[in-house]
Amino acid sequence: MQPADSTPATFHPNAPTKTNILGMNQEQLGAYFKHIGEKPFRATQVMKWIYQHGVTDFAQMTNLSKGLREKLSEQACIELPEVVHKEFSEDGTRKWVFKVAGGSLVETVLIPADDSKVNGRKTLCISSQVGCALDCSFCSTGKQGFERDLTAAEIIGQLWVANASYMEGVDSTEWQNNVTNVVMMGMGEPLLNYTPVVSSMGLMLSDHAYGLSKRRVTLSTSGVVPKMYELYKDIDVALAISLHAPNDELRNELVPINKKYPLSELIAAAKAYVHDNNPRHKKHVTIEYVMLAGVNDSDEHAQQLVALLDGLPSKINLIPFNPFPHAPYDRSSNNRIHAFSNILNNAGFVCTIRQTRGDDIDAACGQLVGQVADRTRRSAKWQQSIKQLAANEQQSEG
């Protein structure tokens, strides 16, 4: 469903640049075809070519008339984000660095559930912004600051490229969508780029595009409460909450947005999302909880978490912290993580411990920064602090 506050795409057929139709939903693409004097039903045909057959050349869209193909070639384009770097891990994880308009770089990671299974689950972690404005203290991605929102084309283009990586040399008639799950959990806070994110997720669900199940498309938020209330009215997808602390005092430190939307408001919004009036909608949320040694991993913290989530149907995903240079935290020990998990399981929650994947290519959770360059003040300040720490260490050693 298209969000209520979505604005229609703007077309400029007389402009020197072509209209990029990648990322347009069915309504927008239908309006585009009507604008250029064609029938709106052409939208579904073109969507299938782009997303189900991997075709970006209008000349190859054989069920369109020759005249229409020529018109589209003159006035439109299907412009994907540019891949400037890619790495495939030994464990099957894949990572891409994309250059988007203006020269900014973003990263995307694909994580297979089991590389030994050819047709096993493949989850793509998609970015929604260049950098992130939230500055969570344990996340290296946040240290580069925020530059800009991604467009719908830049968001859905990440999924297109990931699928295409499995289809090299395959004819368009044999094209398959290998990505089985999508999580809006990459760089950025998805709910702070609301309309392009919801529009892109609509394409992921659309039978004319990727046709993914609503249970296989997940939006992860750190707690932008007002947008959580909008979300369940606009689209039905799975919801994950980056929680990471069971009380306000600690969460204010780890996830600064908590100062604006404290836990009482966040949990109320999550309950509203789960218990909306549509019986076909979501029945639980996933709680993401990074495990930081001596910070949020005690038995007391686990018990506080049990109390906090009372009445909220939840699955809890414990994430071993992935250290980055000069990070102020350490990873909880395996014994501590399992002890924490046992308390949650004994309280009746489904609790899993995330398997760390893609470490050899810096693709782990919270590490989407790698080769990504940025030009923000926060990044400069962070880089300066690293240099200062290194200088202090060198001076102490001398």
Image: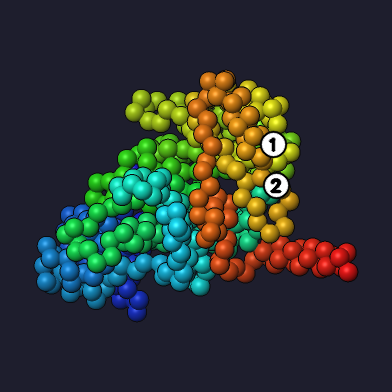
- Write the residue at 60% across / 60% down: 146
The quarter of the displayed image where residue 94 is located: bottom left
Q: In the rendered image, which quarter contains the C terminus?
A: bottom right
Q: Is residue 175 left or right of residue 309?
A: left
Residue wearing tag 2: 330
- Write the residue at 55% across / 50% down: 365
At numbered mark 1, what does the secondary structure look like: helix, strand or loop? Answer: loop
- Tag 2: residue type? Asp
Q: CA distance from mark 1 to mark 2?
A: 11 Å
Residue 16 % position (x, y): 34, 79
Query: Is residue 325 positioned above or below 352 on the image?
Result: below
Residue 397 % position (x, y): 86, 65
Residue 257 % position (x, y): 65, 44
The single residue placed furthest to the bottom in the displayed view is 16
- Tag 1: residue type? Asn
Which label is found at residue 372? none
Q: Is residue 220 left or right of residue 168?
A: right
Q: How is the image coloured?
A: rainbow
Query: Is residue 346 positioned above or below 264 on the image?
Result: above
- Asked if residue 83 can be seen in this view, the reply is yes
Which label is found at residue 296? 1
Query: Is residue 191 positioned above or below 129 on the image?
Result: above
- Write the residue at 70% across / 41% down: 293
At numbered mark 2, what does the secondary structure look like: helix, strand or loop? Answer: loop
Q: Earlier in the sequence, mark 1 or mark 2?
A: 1
